[in-house]
Image (cartoon, rainbow, N blue to C red):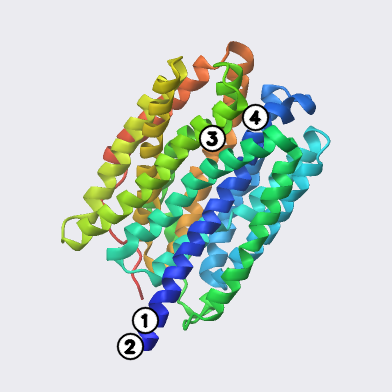
Amino acid sequence: MATIAKTNGLVRALVILLGAAVFLNYVDRGSIAVAAPLMKGELGLTATEFGTAVSAFFWIYAPVQLVVGWLCDRFSVYRLIAWGVILWAASTLLMGFVGGFLSLLVLRVILGVGESVVFPASGKIIARHVPAESRGLANASCAAGIALGPALGTLFGGMILASLGWRAIFFVFGLATLIWLLPWQRVVGGLPVIRDGAREPMVPIGGLLRSRALWAMGIGHAAGNYGFYFLLAWLPLFLVQQRGFSIQEMTLLASLGYAVQAVAALALGVLSDRWTRSGRSEAAMRRWLLAIGQFLMAACIVGIGISEDTIATGVLLCLAGVASASLSTNLYSVAQMFAGPRAAGTWIGIQNAVGNISGILQPIIAGILIDRSGYDGAFYLAAGVAAFGGLWWIVGVPRIAQVIPND
Protein backbone atom coordinates (compact mmCIF):
# COMPACT_ATOMS: atom_id res chain seq x y z
CA MET A 1 0.00 0.00 0.00
CA ALA A 2 2.84 2.39 0.80
CA THR A 3 4.39 1.73 -2.60
CA ILE A 4 1.08 2.39 -4.36
CA ALA A 5 0.57 5.61 -2.41
CA LYS A 6 4.10 6.74 -3.23
CA THR A 7 3.58 5.98 -6.92
CA ASN A 8 0.26 7.87 -6.98
CA GLY A 9 1.94 10.82 -5.30
CA LEU A 10 4.73 10.84 -7.87
CA VAL A 11 2.22 10.68 -10.73
CA ARG A 12 0.32 13.64 -9.26
CA ALA A 13 3.59 15.55 -8.95
CA LEU A 14 4.44 14.58 -12.53
CA VAL A 15 1.12 15.96 -13.81
CA ILE A 16 1.61 19.20 -11.85
CA LEU A 17 5.09 19.61 -13.34
CA LEU A 18 3.74 18.98 -16.83
CA GLY A 19 1.21 21.73 -16.24
CA ALA A 20 4.06 23.96 -15.04
CA ALA A 21 6.07 23.17 -18.18
CA VAL A 22 3.12 24.14 -20.38
CA PHE A 23 2.71 27.30 -18.30
CA LEU A 24 6.37 28.28 -18.85
CA ASN A 25 6.03 27.32 -22.52
CA TYR A 26 3.29 29.91 -23.00
CA VAL A 27 4.95 32.53 -20.82
CA ASP A 28 8.06 32.38 -23.01
CA ARG A 29 6.40 32.12 -26.42
CA GLY A 30 4.00 34.96 -25.56
CA SER A 31 6.65 37.28 -24.13
CA ILE A 32 7.18 38.88 -27.55
CA ALA A 33 3.56 40.09 -27.58
CA VAL A 34 3.90 41.64 -24.12
CA ALA A 35 7.15 43.35 -25.12
CA ALA A 36 5.70 44.53 -28.45
CA PRO A 37 4.35 47.97 -27.42
CA LEU A 38 7.94 49.14 -26.71
CA MET A 39 10.07 46.62 -28.61
CA LYS A 40 8.32 47.14 -31.95
CA GLY A 41 9.11 50.86 -31.98
CA GLU A 42 12.67 50.58 -30.64
CA LEU A 43 13.62 47.95 -33.23
CA GLY A 44 11.73 49.76 -36.02
CA LEU A 45 9.51 46.79 -36.92
CA THR A 46 6.48 47.12 -39.20
CA ALA A 47 3.35 45.12 -38.36
CA THR A 48 4.29 42.68 -41.14
CA GLU A 49 7.81 42.22 -39.72
CA PHE A 50 6.45 41.77 -36.21
CA GLY A 51 3.93 39.20 -37.49
CA THR A 52 6.74 37.41 -39.33
CA ALA A 53 8.82 37.26 -36.13
CA VAL A 54 5.84 35.79 -34.25
CA SER A 55 5.27 33.34 -37.11
CA ALA A 56 8.95 32.27 -37.17
CA PHE A 57 8.42 30.34 -33.94
CA PHE A 58 5.98 28.08 -35.77
CA TRP A 59 8.11 27.57 -38.89
CA ILE A 60 10.08 24.93 -37.01
CA TYR A 61 7.73 24.27 -34.06
CA ALA A 62 5.06 22.75 -36.32
CA PRO A 63 7.07 20.48 -38.67
CA VAL A 64 9.61 19.30 -36.09
CA GLN A 65 6.78 17.77 -34.07
CA LEU A 66 6.56 15.04 -36.70
CA VAL A 67 9.98 13.92 -35.47
CA VAL A 68 9.65 14.87 -31.81
CA GLY A 69 6.45 12.85 -31.37
CA TRP A 70 8.17 9.75 -32.77
CA LEU A 71 11.15 10.33 -30.48
CA CYS A 72 8.82 10.48 -27.47
CA ASP A 73 7.49 7.01 -28.32
CA ARG A 74 10.98 5.66 -29.06
CA PHE A 75 13.30 7.12 -26.40
CA SER A 76 13.09 8.47 -22.85
CA VAL A 77 10.30 11.02 -22.98
CA TYR A 78 11.38 12.37 -19.59
CA ARG A 79 14.87 13.32 -20.79
CA LEU A 80 13.55 14.77 -24.06
CA ILE A 81 11.30 17.25 -22.29
CA ALA A 82 14.17 18.33 -20.02
CA TRP A 83 16.45 19.09 -22.98
CA GLY A 84 13.64 20.98 -24.67
CA VAL A 85 13.24 23.19 -21.60
CA ILE A 86 16.97 23.97 -21.55
CA LEU A 87 16.94 25.01 -25.21
CA TRP A 88 13.87 27.23 -25.08
CA ALA A 89 14.93 28.88 -21.80
CA ALA A 90 18.28 29.82 -23.36
CA SER A 91 16.65 31.26 -26.50
CA THR A 92 14.20 33.29 -24.38
CA LEU A 93 17.00 34.77 -22.32
CA LEU A 94 19.03 35.67 -25.41
CA MET A 95 16.09 37.61 -26.91
CA GLY A 96 16.90 40.28 -24.37
CA PHE A 97 20.03 41.05 -26.41
CA VAL A 98 18.50 41.31 -29.90
CA GLY A 99 19.33 44.37 -31.97
CA GLY A 100 17.02 43.97 -34.92
CA PHE A 101 14.65 41.88 -36.99
CA LEU A 102 17.11 39.17 -38.09
CA SER A 103 18.43 38.21 -34.64
CA LEU A 104 14.87 38.18 -33.28
CA LEU A 105 13.80 35.92 -36.15
CA VAL A 106 16.61 33.41 -35.50
CA LEU A 107 15.93 33.18 -31.78
CA ARG A 108 12.20 32.70 -32.37
CA VAL A 109 13.04 29.74 -34.61
CA ILE A 110 15.28 28.23 -31.88
CA LEU A 111 12.52 28.80 -29.34
CA GLY A 112 10.22 26.77 -31.58
CA VAL A 113 12.63 23.84 -31.60
CA GLY A 114 12.85 23.75 -27.81
CA GLU A 115 9.14 24.14 -27.14
CA SER A 116 8.11 21.53 -29.72
CA VAL A 117 8.60 18.67 -27.26
CA VAL A 118 6.08 19.75 -24.61
CA PHE A 119 2.76 18.54 -25.99
CA PRO A 120 3.88 15.23 -27.53
CA ALA A 121 5.78 14.48 -24.32
CA SER A 122 2.98 15.47 -21.94
CA GLY A 123 0.43 13.54 -23.99
CA LYS A 124 2.64 10.46 -23.92
CA ILE A 125 3.23 10.71 -20.18
CA ILE A 126 -0.45 11.23 -19.34
CA ALA A 127 -1.51 8.36 -21.61
CA ARG A 128 1.08 6.12 -19.91
CA HIS A 129 0.42 7.01 -16.26
CA VAL A 130 -3.15 8.38 -15.93
CA PRO A 131 -6.35 6.23 -16.18
CA ALA A 132 -9.31 7.34 -18.31
CA GLU A 133 -11.43 8.42 -15.35
CA SER A 134 -8.72 10.93 -14.34
CA ARG A 135 -7.75 11.98 -17.86
CA GLY A 136 -9.84 15.16 -17.85
CA LEU A 137 -8.19 16.74 -14.81
CA ALA A 138 -4.69 15.68 -15.92
CA ASN A 139 -5.16 17.36 -19.29
CA ALA A 140 -6.88 20.28 -17.56
CA SER A 141 -3.65 20.86 -15.62
CA CYS A 142 -1.88 21.37 -18.94
CA ALA A 143 -4.80 23.43 -20.26
CA ALA A 144 -4.57 25.63 -17.17
CA GLY A 145 -0.91 26.14 -18.01
CA ILE A 146 -1.92 27.30 -21.51
CA ALA A 147 -4.08 29.96 -19.86
CA LEU A 148 -1.95 30.88 -16.86
CA GLY A 149 1.12 31.31 -19.06
CA PRO A 150 -0.37 34.25 -20.99
CA ALA A 151 -2.23 35.48 -17.85
CA LEU A 152 0.74 35.74 -15.52
CA GLY A 153 3.15 36.31 -18.38
CA THR A 154 1.10 39.32 -19.45
CA LEU A 155 0.62 40.52 -15.87
CA PHE A 156 4.23 40.28 -14.71
CA GLY A 157 5.60 41.01 -18.17
CA GLY A 158 3.54 44.20 -18.28
CA MET A 159 4.86 45.21 -14.86
CA ILE A 160 8.43 44.56 -15.97
CA LEU A 161 7.79 46.41 -19.24
CA ALA A 162 6.49 49.49 -17.44
CA SER A 163 9.32 49.63 -14.89
CA LEU A 164 12.42 48.03 -16.46
CA GLY A 165 11.78 47.99 -20.21
CA TRP A 166 11.17 45.20 -22.72
CA ARG A 167 14.58 43.50 -22.59
CA ALA A 168 14.22 42.65 -18.90
CA ILE A 169 11.12 40.58 -19.71
CA PHE A 170 13.22 38.03 -21.61
CA PHE A 171 15.99 37.93 -19.00
CA VAL A 172 13.59 37.24 -16.13
CA PHE A 173 11.42 34.72 -17.97
CA GLY A 174 14.36 32.76 -19.39
CA LEU A 175 16.01 32.34 -16.00
CA ALA A 176 12.72 31.40 -14.32
CA THR A 177 12.16 28.58 -16.83
CA LEU A 178 15.49 26.94 -15.99
CA ILE A 179 14.41 26.50 -12.35
CA TRP A 180 11.75 23.98 -13.46
CA LEU A 181 14.46 21.41 -14.14
CA LEU A 182 15.26 20.94 -10.45
CA PRO A 183 11.94 19.39 -9.28
CA TRP A 184 11.55 17.54 -12.60
CA GLN A 185 14.77 15.60 -12.11
CA ARG A 186 13.78 14.66 -8.57
CA VAL A 187 10.28 13.42 -9.45
CA VAL A 188 11.34 11.48 -12.55
CA GLY A 189 14.18 9.87 -10.61
CA GLY A 190 11.65 8.35 -8.19
CA LEU A 191 9.26 6.89 -10.77
CA PRO A 192 9.11 3.06 -10.51
CA VAL A 193 8.52 2.61 -14.25
CA ILE A 194 10.49 1.68 -17.32
CA ARG A 195 11.69 4.99 -18.71
CA ASP A 196 12.92 3.71 -22.02
CA GLY A 197 10.26 3.97 -24.72
CA ALA A 198 12.25 1.53 -26.87
CA ARG A 199 10.87 -1.35 -24.78
CA GLU A 200 7.33 -0.59 -25.87
CA PRO A 201 6.18 -2.10 -29.18
CA MET A 202 6.32 0.63 -31.80
CA VAL A 203 3.39 1.63 -34.00
CA PRO A 204 4.44 2.09 -37.66
CA ILE A 205 4.13 5.77 -38.52
CA GLY A 206 2.76 4.87 -41.96
CA GLY A 207 -0.28 3.29 -40.33
CA LEU A 208 -0.92 6.45 -38.33
CA LEU A 209 -0.60 8.65 -41.40
CA ARG A 210 -3.33 6.64 -43.11
CA SER A 211 -5.77 7.29 -40.27
CA ARG A 212 -8.59 9.63 -41.23
CA ALA A 213 -9.13 10.41 -37.55
CA LEU A 214 -5.60 11.78 -37.18
CA TRP A 215 -5.96 14.24 -40.07
CA ALA A 216 -9.43 15.25 -38.92
CA MET A 217 -8.02 16.03 -35.48
CA GLY A 218 -5.23 18.06 -37.06
CA ILE A 219 -7.72 20.20 -39.02
CA GLY A 220 -9.85 20.80 -35.92
CA HIS A 221 -6.71 21.64 -33.96
CA ALA A 222 -5.65 24.19 -36.60
CA ALA A 223 -9.05 25.88 -36.62
CA GLY A 224 -9.01 26.12 -32.84
CA ASN A 225 -5.47 27.47 -32.70
CA TYR A 226 -6.14 30.26 -35.19
CA GLY A 227 -8.40 32.28 -32.91
CA PHE A 228 -6.38 31.63 -29.77
CA TYR A 229 -3.08 32.56 -31.41
CA PHE A 230 -4.66 35.64 -32.96
CA LEU A 231 -5.62 37.00 -29.54
CA LEU A 232 -2.33 35.89 -28.00
CA ALA A 233 -0.22 37.72 -30.61
CA TRP A 234 -2.27 40.84 -31.39
CA LEU A 235 -4.45 41.65 -28.38
CA PRO A 236 -1.84 43.75 -26.46
CA LEU A 237 -1.07 45.87 -29.53
CA PHE A 238 -4.77 46.23 -30.41
CA LEU A 239 -5.78 47.36 -26.94
CA VAL A 240 -2.95 49.89 -26.69
CA GLN A 241 -2.88 51.24 -30.25
CA GLN A 242 -6.54 51.05 -31.29
CA ARG A 243 -8.45 51.32 -28.04
CA GLY A 244 -6.11 53.73 -26.27
CA PHE A 245 -5.55 51.67 -23.13
CA SER A 246 -2.42 52.25 -21.09
CA ILE A 247 0.05 49.39 -20.71
CA GLN A 248 -1.24 48.81 -17.19
CA GLU A 249 -4.87 48.70 -18.35
CA MET A 250 -4.00 46.37 -21.23
CA THR A 251 -2.14 44.11 -18.82
CA LEU A 252 -5.07 43.82 -16.42
CA LEU A 253 -7.66 43.21 -19.15
CA ALA A 254 -5.64 40.56 -20.97
CA SER A 255 -4.62 38.86 -17.71
CA LEU A 256 -8.26 38.71 -16.58
CA GLY A 257 -9.30 36.75 -19.66
CA TYR A 258 -6.47 34.26 -19.26
CA ALA A 259 -7.13 33.86 -15.52
CA VAL A 260 -10.76 32.94 -16.26
CA GLN A 261 -9.48 30.49 -18.87
CA ALA A 262 -7.32 28.73 -16.26
CA VAL A 263 -10.17 28.41 -13.76
CA ALA A 264 -12.56 27.20 -16.48
CA ALA A 265 -10.03 24.59 -17.65
CA LEU A 266 -9.72 23.06 -14.18
CA ALA A 267 -13.49 23.14 -13.67
CA LEU A 268 -14.11 21.45 -17.02
CA GLY A 269 -11.48 18.84 -16.19
CA VAL A 270 -13.20 17.94 -12.90
CA LEU A 271 -16.66 17.89 -14.48
CA SER A 272 -15.53 15.79 -17.45
CA ASP A 273 -13.97 13.20 -15.13
CA ARG A 274 -17.20 12.99 -13.13
CA TRP A 275 -19.12 12.54 -16.38
CA THR A 276 -16.80 9.71 -17.45
CA ARG A 277 -16.95 7.96 -14.06
CA SER A 278 -20.76 8.05 -14.25
CA GLY A 279 -20.62 5.74 -17.26
CA ARG A 280 -21.90 8.28 -19.79
CA SER A 281 -20.22 8.75 -23.16
CA GLU A 282 -16.88 10.49 -22.77
CA ALA A 283 -16.57 10.78 -26.55
CA ALA A 284 -19.88 12.63 -27.05
CA MET A 285 -19.20 14.98 -24.15
CA ARG A 286 -15.77 15.98 -25.45
CA ARG A 287 -16.95 16.42 -29.05
CA TRP A 288 -19.71 18.85 -28.03
CA LEU A 289 -17.50 20.79 -25.64
CA LEU A 290 -15.05 21.31 -28.50
CA ALA A 291 -17.78 22.46 -30.90
CA ILE A 292 -19.48 24.82 -28.45
CA GLY A 293 -16.14 26.27 -27.42
CA GLN A 294 -15.32 27.12 -31.03
CA PHE A 295 -18.64 28.83 -31.71
CA LEU A 296 -18.25 30.85 -28.52
CA MET A 297 -14.73 31.87 -29.52
CA ALA A 298 -15.96 33.11 -32.91
CA ALA A 299 -18.60 35.30 -31.27
CA CYS A 300 -16.12 36.69 -28.75
CA ILE A 301 -13.53 37.64 -31.38
CA VAL A 302 -16.15 39.63 -33.32
CA GLY A 303 -17.30 41.30 -30.12
CA ILE A 304 -13.78 42.27 -29.01
CA GLY A 305 -13.08 43.73 -32.44
CA ILE A 306 -16.09 46.06 -32.38
CA SER A 307 -16.41 46.84 -28.67
CA GLU A 308 -15.19 50.22 -27.43
CA ASP A 309 -16.42 49.78 -23.86
CA THR A 310 -13.93 48.67 -21.23
CA ILE A 311 -16.36 46.51 -19.24
CA ALA A 312 -17.77 44.84 -22.37
CA THR A 313 -14.25 44.11 -23.60
CA GLY A 314 -13.38 42.55 -20.25
CA VAL A 315 -16.49 40.35 -20.27
CA LEU A 316 -15.80 39.21 -23.84
CA LEU A 317 -12.20 38.36 -22.95
CA CYS A 318 -13.47 36.26 -20.03
CA LEU A 319 -15.88 34.40 -22.32
CA ALA A 320 -13.09 33.89 -24.84
CA GLY A 321 -11.10 32.38 -21.98
CA VAL A 322 -13.90 29.89 -21.28
CA ALA A 323 -13.99 29.00 -24.99
CA SER A 324 -10.23 28.43 -25.09
CA ALA A 325 -10.42 26.31 -21.96
CA SER A 326 -13.03 24.07 -23.54
CA LEU A 327 -10.76 23.52 -26.53
CA SER A 328 -7.48 22.98 -24.71
CA THR A 329 -8.95 20.71 -22.02
CA ASN A 330 -10.55 18.33 -24.51
CA LEU A 331 -8.26 18.46 -27.53
CA TYR A 332 -5.48 16.28 -26.13
CA SER A 333 -7.90 14.07 -24.21
CA VAL A 334 -9.53 13.11 -27.52
CA ALA A 335 -6.11 12.55 -29.11
CA GLN A 336 -5.21 10.18 -26.25
CA MET A 337 -8.53 8.38 -26.73
CA PHE A 338 -7.80 7.81 -30.41
CA ALA A 339 -4.11 6.89 -30.02
CA GLY A 340 -3.86 4.96 -26.75
CA PRO A 341 -0.62 4.92 -24.71
CA ARG A 342 1.54 3.20 -27.36
CA ALA A 343 1.15 5.85 -30.04
CA ALA A 344 0.21 8.97 -28.07
CA GLY A 345 3.53 10.74 -28.61
CA THR A 346 3.62 10.20 -32.37
CA TRP A 347 -0.10 10.92 -32.79
CA ILE A 348 0.02 14.20 -30.86
CA GLY A 349 3.23 15.18 -32.63
CA ILE A 350 1.58 14.81 -36.05
CA GLN A 351 -1.66 16.42 -34.85
CA ASN A 352 0.27 19.37 -33.41
CA ALA A 353 2.28 19.74 -36.62
CA VAL A 354 -0.94 20.14 -38.60
CA GLY A 355 -2.66 22.18 -35.92
CA ASN A 356 0.15 24.70 -35.65
CA ILE A 357 0.08 25.58 -39.33
CA SER A 358 -2.23 28.28 -37.96
CA GLY A 359 0.69 29.61 -35.96
CA ILE A 360 2.70 29.97 -39.16
CA LEU A 361 -0.02 31.60 -41.27
CA GLN A 362 -2.07 33.64 -38.80
CA PRO A 363 0.54 36.21 -37.67
CA ILE A 364 1.65 36.93 -41.25
CA ILE A 365 -1.89 37.10 -42.66
CA ALA A 366 -3.05 39.29 -39.78
CA GLY A 367 0.02 41.53 -40.10
CA ILE A 368 -0.62 42.07 -43.82
CA LEU A 369 -4.33 42.79 -43.24
CA ILE A 370 -3.53 45.22 -40.42
CA ASP A 371 -0.90 47.07 -42.48
CA ARG A 372 -3.27 47.39 -45.46
CA SER A 373 -6.67 48.04 -43.94
CA GLY A 374 -6.53 48.03 -40.15
CA TYR A 375 -7.68 45.45 -37.61
CA ASP A 376 -11.27 44.79 -38.77
CA GLY A 377 -10.44 42.27 -41.50
CA ALA A 378 -8.04 40.39 -39.24
CA PHE A 379 -10.70 40.06 -36.53
CA TYR A 380 -13.42 38.86 -38.92
CA LEU A 381 -11.12 36.29 -40.53
CA ALA A 382 -10.12 34.88 -37.13
CA ALA A 383 -13.79 34.62 -36.14
CA GLY A 384 -14.66 32.87 -39.40
CA VAL A 385 -11.94 30.24 -38.93
CA ALA A 386 -13.11 29.64 -35.36
CA ALA A 387 -16.72 29.15 -36.51
CA PHE A 388 -15.58 26.68 -39.16
CA GLY A 389 -13.84 24.76 -36.37
CA GLY A 390 -17.11 24.47 -34.47
CA LEU A 391 -18.79 22.87 -37.48
CA TRP A 392 -15.79 20.63 -38.09
CA TRP A 393 -15.95 19.03 -34.62
CA ILE A 394 -19.56 18.10 -35.31
CA VAL A 395 -19.34 16.75 -38.87
CA GLY A 396 -15.65 16.34 -39.75
CA VAL A 397 -14.24 14.23 -36.91
CA PRO A 398 -15.18 10.52 -37.06
CA ARG A 399 -16.43 8.38 -34.17
CA ILE A 400 -14.11 8.88 -31.22
CA ALA A 401 -12.66 5.53 -30.18
CA GLN A 402 -9.18 4.04 -29.84
CA VAL A 403 -7.80 3.14 -33.26
CA ILE A 404 -4.39 1.83 -32.09
CA PRO A 405 -4.48 -1.45 -30.11
CA ASN A 406 -2.56 -1.56 -26.82
CA ASP A 407 -0.49 -4.57 -27.84
Residue position for label 4: 51
Query: Exactly how many numbered labels are in the figure?
Result: 4
Q: Measuring from the top left, give residue 122's x and y in whole percent.
A: 48, 61
Three-letter amino acid code at disc 2?
Met
Query: Nearer the observer, disc 2 or disc 3?
Result: 2
Q: Quadrant of residue 240?
A: top right
Q: Measuring from the top left, give residue 70's x and y in whole percent.
A: 54, 63
Is there any visible trace of residue 220 in the rendered image? no
Three-letter amino acid code at disc 1?
Ala
Query: Nearer the observer, disc 3 or disc 4?
Result: 3
Query: Nearer the observer, disc 3 or disc 1?
Result: 1
Q: Quadrant of residue 301?
A: top left
Give the answer, above or below, for where 249 lies relative to 344: above
Three-letter amino acid code at disc 4?
Gly
Q: Is residue 154 left or right of residue 205?
A: right
Q: Secondary structure at mark 4?
A: helix
Q: Residue furthest front?
A: 163
Q: Are marks 1 and 2 in contact (CB under 8 Å)?
A: yes
Q: Are marks 3 and 1 in contact (CB under 8 Å)?
A: no
Residue position for label 2: 1
Q: Is residue 285 left or right of residue 380?
A: left
Q: Residue furthest right?
A: 99
Q: Earlier in the sequence, mark 3 or mark 1?
A: 1
Q: Earlier in the sequence, mark 2 or mark 3?
A: 2
Q: Earlier in the sequence, mark 3 or mark 4?
A: 4
Q: Measuring from the top left, give residue 61's x and y in whole percent.
A: 61, 48
